[in-house]
Amino acid sequence: MNKLGRRVVLRGSVGLAAAGTFASPYIARAQAKTASVLWVQGFVKEEDEAFQNLVAAYEKASGNKIDYSLIPFGPAMQKIVAGLTSGDTPDIMFHDIADQAVVPQNTWNDKLIDVSDIVETQKDKFHPTALLASKYYNNVTKQRGFTYVPVKCGVLPFHVWNSMVEKAGFKLADAPKTWDAFWDFFKPMQKKLRETQRNVYVHGLQPTTNGPADGNNTFHHFLIANGGNGIVSPDGEAHLDDPQVKEAVIKSLTYITTSYKEGYVPPGALGWSDADDNNAFHAKQIVMDLDGTISTEVAMIHEKEKYDDAITLKLPNDNAGQPMRAELGAAGAFIAKSAKNVAVAKDFLKYVIQPDNLNLYLKTGLGRWLPPMPHLVKEDPFWLKQDPHRTAYATEGMIDPTVPNYPCFNPGYAEVNAQQVWGIAVADVVKDGMTVQAATDKALKRISTILAKYPVTRS
Amino acid sequence: MSTDTLEGAGLLVRPRPPLLGRMWRGGLQGSEWTWAIAFTVPYIALFLAFVAYPVAFGAWLGRDPSLYFELAEDPIFQRTIVNTILYVGIAVNLKMFGALLLSGFFMRRGWWVKGLLLVFVLPWAMPALPAFISIHWMLNGEWGLFNNFLFNVFGIEGPGWLDTSRWLALGAVITSHIWKWMPFWTVILLAGRMAIPQELYEAAEVDGATGLTRFTHVTFPLLANLYLVCTLLSTIFTLGDFNSVYFVSGGGPALSTHVLATLGIRDAFEVARPELGVATVLTALPLMIPLVLILMRKLRTTEVTL
């Protein structure tokens, strides 16, 4: 028997190291047809199955391999941020709120690959707002470019328990058609409902400082309804001194804080996470909720009575009586400069955004997300004709007027969102007793400070 | 290789390496040195990969002085500093003092005391995350267990514990932390008390020392060093505690109960600025480093009995 001596150990170690060194190029070449993908897990299992089907179909058609991880919403964002920081990223990263939270800043810092060759393949079919949400400003090249591939879209419809409205003696058909009046319509119901249910509230308002998305989305809809959509213009310039914007902020803060102080909003909403309003709605602790996508309804799809009792409503007109523009979020994919298999990654994304593939993917996911292509919604009866929830949702998102999230105009607004400036303004009033005027001035000053770090228009 | 022969002994002696080389090799010679290297390399590699590199990378991320100016101007960060001081100061001292008193109680004889100790340590044995998440739900102002209990039993509408008041929320966080960790330190101090020789108490009793006098003249002097070391350790742990705050109050209401550990994670991953998150956490270093140094000095002390 050979003796395991020092020299044997050392020679063996050197041999292994040498074999690894010489073999590595062949290993790398063997993986050249594989792309690694980080994709956000769905809200319901059907969404994950839809993605798995999409991957299987692509692998069969292309012969390439997709090595994917389906990761929950919160941890996925952490992994993306950590990967972009360390430079060790999957080839494709996808997140539901990447257009608001990670792509604007990383395009600004020149960390993402240009994906115009992917977007161009379907450019004429994309919704104009989704196209706006795919272009971001790069502070190194001093230009805007496509760094984001929109895969699915979502808007915020109203979700209402019809049985609670009727129990309070009202009919939804009587709901007014303008923004503030529509919210006011629910207020008288609370007294009646509290005769039989303790701690029930009518407004699923989300003046929260927890994120990541709902608090900001809620406030932005009030801002738009009050004529403040021009807070950031498409050229990236902020208009914080514009009297119309300031007045819209004041009106929005006034409505939200008054409703909160008058007791129509659950006090805990100040600290709600994105799932808490859904939980409160499902528990029938709130009569209505303004919340993104139709995840609220899709979660009950196997409970027919509840599914039919919930009503999805598209937005009423704004306070000037004009059609309200919904904030259209674009969930999508992007490729970091640290990606190793860019060719396969791009090939896969080109496959994903082919209209038929995209439509099948989103339909299999129960229609929780809309295709970013209006013609699909108009041509396929699945979206506008087969289900009342989807009809209202798809009409709001793909037929009615929309605006993109502000970070696509100015990446600094992504930090404004992350800093929850609007939620803090609400808290300043309802928690710390500040006047609406003072809270408005404080919020606008804070936004100005943040945006000053991102001089888009001065570049 | 040349060798020398010891006269009269017939032994072969290798030439001694120079003094500096011997010192560097810790007295090891020949293959001993090679084997020592072979065995230590994996540990050194692990240390470099998982301790030195992350720390150095973190320091590199937080190297830009402008980050600290940005933090200094951030009202949330300013409030977070105050919260951190209050959280660590109140939670650690209440917890350790309570543990000191309770360890005395659990020294009592009797099966029921042992049974009570078993129940008392349960919070510590319980996984932290489900425990804190449960507390968060129990404190829900509208539908939580506490307020439902108050309403159903006393007809009182309880406050929104975590909803609108910074101080109620911070109090809830501190209470939860104490509930979770006091049992651990109680057991440590109980072990310390049990190590005090019984003869000392008997001698003290002969001298007329009982009750509080016995505690102040025998128990506490002998436990003092252990108590100090435990307090320092607990301060370091609490300064880095993320779970209690994140899962009980979530840093709310309106970001008013964040501590450095939670704000750092928020800045890194929610604000998506890892360098700002690292800078936030690094601001704890001026407090952390002196604590570690004092702790190291205390641990080197050999004169104190416990």
Image: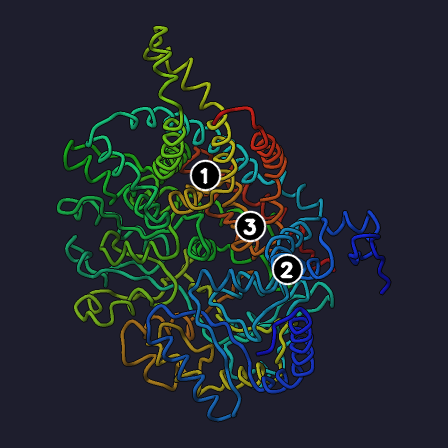
Say which of B203 and B170 sits in front. Answer: B203
In the displayed structure, does residue A64 sit left or right of residue A358? right
Of the residues under marks 3 and 1, which one precedes in the sequence?
A: 1
The reply to whether discs 1 and 2 touch (Cβ–Cβ < 8 Å) is: no
- Residue A1 appears in the picture as rendered: yes
Is the residue marked by circle 2 packed among few (<14), some (14-19), or many (20+) residues within 10 Å?
Answer: few
Residue at 52 percent across and 65 percent down: it is: A98
In the displayed structure, does residue A390 sit left or right of residue B230? left
Residue at 53 percent across and 88 percent down: it is: A64
Is the residue marked by circle 3 packed among few (<14), some (14-19), or many (20+) residues within 10 Å?
Answer: many
Question: Alpha carbon of mark 2 to alpha carbon of mark 3: how far?
Answer: 31 Å
**Vertical side of A424 occupied by A386: above or below:** below
Q: Chain of mark 1?
A: B
Q: Secondary structure at mark 1?
A: loop
- Label at residue B257: 1
- The kind of residue on which mark 2 rests is Ala
The reply to whether discs 2 and 3 touch (Cβ–Cβ < 8 Å) is: no
